[in-house]
Image: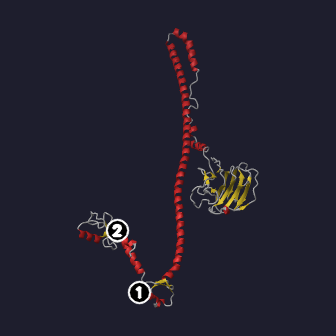
């Protein structure tokens, strides 16, 4: 009995497997020779199946169906030949355990297989089939793992794009603020320039007007005196004394001079302009010695837009990348330190459970992280210092500090915690650092913990 696949590959005319199948416009296929014979006998070019008239005398070859038929015939021939012994053309019924090969009954009696052990093929295939099935089950599990990881990869790819767009918006927002500051600063400085220009131009205009009035008065005196000089002797002598006094008074006037400070103070407006703007800009920006890395933050931690504060919130759907903490509600600074001295302050506020300190770079984030931790912990009203999971003596503090200063001296092997408001030392670790250490913050409450800004010194 033919299989359903074989029935689907049979020509409706000859009922054999298609040979060079062609396809009509009605989508029915036939062997090329069968179709031409049918048309020649019928005298018209109708579809033998649905009687629809064909517009083409040479229908196109159905290449997909042709390839399928050839593959089917080839596989069928191989299956038939695989069931027979290649030496005796007898049906394979036994399996030689010594040679690990299929044999027929003739092979069993051959000298080549003398004293060999044989099993019926059904019995011989049972154990290998079981082993292969177990191996296949393991492979299916591995396939499932790969598929699950691919889902995570797809989620990570989406998260990368979301991160990029979010970061782009933040960058634009920051530059927008800077642009606004610079525009306002430019406007203020231009306004100061224009105000000075207006004041000094007005002052100069007033002085020019006053000088013009004095010039006009002197000109009148000159004209009147010249007139008196041209008069007769009697008239001249009568008016000479008054004219002489008038001229003498005019000669006593001080010569006009350009006043100091009359010009625009260009040096005041242009001197160290960029530096002065930058120095003023420090009042609107802040420098944080530690920036939190969102790629390390536990899924229940919410970081601020500027990545300087952290609090507990609703669990987020984030990629489970290797850097991210799996069990501990923790986050690391984005930059680690393997030399030098570094200091940062963390505002713990009214949080009732927190930890601050450093974590070794090699520490796995998904499991137990205590082996790489050096921290100061506050929990249930008590302070404890831990170094590589070993608690030191409890730290006694009468008042809870609101700001903790962390100072790492990598070269000298010291890690100190102090009250940033009183400068009182709380605890100091002595430890030999051998790898990069990252700032560490752990928060278990809704209260916000924040890395505080540091002053940026201006050097000349």
In which image quadrant can residue 195 be found?
A: top right
> Callout 2: few (<14), some (14-19), or many (20+) C-alpha neighbours within 10 Å?
few
Q: Secondary structure at mark 2?
A: helix
How many marks overall? Answer: 2
**Residue drawn 39% across the image and 78% down it:** 77
Left or right of 3 on screen, residue 320: right
- How has the structure been colored for display? secondary structure
Depicted 247 relative to depicted 265: above or below: above
Q: CA distance from mark 1 to mark 2?
A: 38 Å
Q: Quadrant of the N terminus?
A: bottom left
Q: Position of residue 17 (x, y in %)?
A: 34, 73
Nearer to us in this view, 295 or 302:
302
Q: Position of residue 168 (x, y in %)?
A: 53, 51
Depicted 190 relative to depicted 339: above or below: above
**Residue drawn 75% across the image and 57% down it:** 394
Q: Looking at this view, name the residue that lies furthest to the top.
A: 234
**Residue drawn 52% across the image and 9% down it:** 235
Question: In the rendered image, which residue does mark 2 sit on?
Answer: 63
Question: In the rendered image, which residue does mark 1 sit on?
Answer: 88
**Residue drawn 62% across the image and 54% down it:** 301
Nearer to us in this view, 439 or 433:
439
Q: Looking at this view, name the residue that lies furthest to the left.
A: 43
Q: Position of residue 159 (x, y in %)?
A: 53, 56
> Callout 1: few (<14), some (14-19), or many (20+) C-alpha neighbours within 10 Å?
few
Counting residues from the start of the chain, the first of labels 1 and 2 encountered is: 2
Left or right of 446 on screen, residue 78: left
Q: Secondary structure at mark 1?
A: loop
**Residue 328 numbered tag:** none
Q: Position of residue 350 (x, y in %)?
A: 69, 49
């Amino acid at each position: 009995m033919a299989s359903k696949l074989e029935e689907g590959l049979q020509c409706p005319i000859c009922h054999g497997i298609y040979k060079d199948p062609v396809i009509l416009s009605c989508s029915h296929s036939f062997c090329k020779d069968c179709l031409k014979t049918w048309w020649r006998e019928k005298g018209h070019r109708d579809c033998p199946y649905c009687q629809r008239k064909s517009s083409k005398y040479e229908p196109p070859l159905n290449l997909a169906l042709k390839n399928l038929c050839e593959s089917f015939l080839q596989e069928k021939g191989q299956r038939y030949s695989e069931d027979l012994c290649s030496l005796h053309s007898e049906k394979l019924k036994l399996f030689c355990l010594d040679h690990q090969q299929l044999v027929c009954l003739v092979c069993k009696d051959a000298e080549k297989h003398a004293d060999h052990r044989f099993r019926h093929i059904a019995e011989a295939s049972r154990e290998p089939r079981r082993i292969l099935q177990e191996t296949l089950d393991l492979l299916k599990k591995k396939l499932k793992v790969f598929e699950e990881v691919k889902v995570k990869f797809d989620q990570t790819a989406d998260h990368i794009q979301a991160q990029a767009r979010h970061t782009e918006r933040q960058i634009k927002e920051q530059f927008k603020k800077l642009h606004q500051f610079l525009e306002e600063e430019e406007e203020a400085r231009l306004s100061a320039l224009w105000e000075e220009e207006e004041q000094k131009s007005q002052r100069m205009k007033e002085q020019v007007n006053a000088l013009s009035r004095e010039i006009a008065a002197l000109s009148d005196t000159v004209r009147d005196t010249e007139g008196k000089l041209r008069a007769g002797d009697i008239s001249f002598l009568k008016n000479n004394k008054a004219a002489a006094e008038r001229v003498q008074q005019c000669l006593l006037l001080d010569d006009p001079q350009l006043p100091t400070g009359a010009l625009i103070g260009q040096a005041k407006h242009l001197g160290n302009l960029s530096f002065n703007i930058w120095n003023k800009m420090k009042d609107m920006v802040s420098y944080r010695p530690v920036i939190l890395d969102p790629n390390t933050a536990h899924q229940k931690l919410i970081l601020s837009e500027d990545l300087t504060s952290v609090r507990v919130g609703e669990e987020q759907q984030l990629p489970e990348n290797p850097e991210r903490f799996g069990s501990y509600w923790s986050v690391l600074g984005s930059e680690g330190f393997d030399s030098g001295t570094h200091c940062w302050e963390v505002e713990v506020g009214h949080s009732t459970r927190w930890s601050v300190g450093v974590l070794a770079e090699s520490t796995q984030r998904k499991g137990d992280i205590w082996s790489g931790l050096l921290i100061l912990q506050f929990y249930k009203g008590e302070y404890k210092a831990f170094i590589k999971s070993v608690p030191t003596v409890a730290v006694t503090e009468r008042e809870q500090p609101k700001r903790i200063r962390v100072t790492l001296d990598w070269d000298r092997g010291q890690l100190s915690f102090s009250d940033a408001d009183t400068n009182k030392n709380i605890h100091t670790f002595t430890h030999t650092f051998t790898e990069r250490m990252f700032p560490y913050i752990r928060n278990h409450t809704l209260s916000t913990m924040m890395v505080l800004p540091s002053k940026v010194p201006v050097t000349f």
